[in-house]
Image (tube, rainbow, N blue to C red):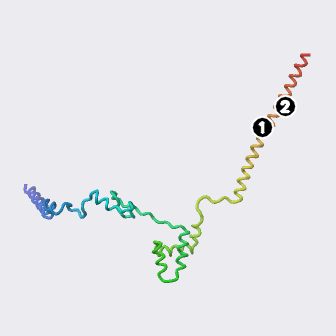
Amino acid sequence: MSKQNGKRKSLRKATASVKRRLPSPSSRLSAGSEGERSEPQRTADNRDAAVPAGGGGAAGVVTGDCEVVAKPKRRTFTAEYKLAVIAAADACTEPGQIGELLRREGLYSSHLSMWRQQLADGQLQAMQVKRGRKPASEAAKLAKVNEQLRRQLAKRDDELRKAHLIIAAQKKVAALLELIDAEADAKRD
């Protein structure tokens, strides 16, 4: 039984030390209506006040009842834009003009140096070529037309062969009818 009493005493000490560290429930309520929260309770009035006038927000801004932060979209730059920025940067002659250009465009100096390297390597010119199906060459177009004409010729040849067979059959039928007609005339006479 002494072991159980020892366990009970250590348990009482542990709970007593925890209770001493926590404020009493009455002191928590008297501190304010907000409890231990560091921000005031949200109501419909102050929740709507946090929404910007545009109705939307930039990345990282909580809007409306939504607690989820929108994920920003990665920027992509076309080859034409990169070449235009490089040309504008090369046209800068006074100190600070390149920095002003980069701030105005929302770029970093690493963008400019990477794009200049791509230009030197010839990658920017390769990016200007449209992706997708390549335009047909003149020889490919002529080959396609040639194949179409061959199919049409084969079709017409087949139709002509059938027409010749029909004409031959009609000649034979006409000859038989003349024979039958001649025999019928001979019997009548």
- Amino acid marked by disc 2: Lys
The x and y percentages for residue 23 are 14, 63
Residue 171: image tag: 2
Residue 90 badge: none
Amino acid type of the residue tagged 1 in the rendering:
Lys
Q: Earlier in the sequence, mark 1 or mark 2?
A: 1
Lateral position of residue 127 relative to residue 143, left or right: left
The residue furthest bottom is: 94
Q: Secondary structure at mark 2?
A: helix
Q: Is residue 116 left or right of residue 172?
A: left
Q: Residue 60: percent from the left, percent from the top?
A: 37, 64
Residue 179 x/y as whole percent? 87, 24
Q: Position of residue 171 (x, y in %)?
A: 84, 31
Q: Quadrant of the N terminus?
A: bottom left
Q: Secondary structure at mark 1?
A: helix
Is residue 8 placed above or below 87 in the rendered structure? above
Give the residue displayed 50% in from the left and 75% down from the top: 112
Note whether 188 is above or below 109 in the view shown: above
| Image quadrant in which you'd find residue 174 | top right
Q: Quadrant of residue 30?
A: bottom left
Return the residue at label 1. 162
Q: Tell me, yes or no, whether the two marked residues, 1 and 2, touch with CB atoms within 8 Å.
A: no
Looking at the rendered image, the quarter that the C terminus falls into is top right
Q: How many marks?
A: 2
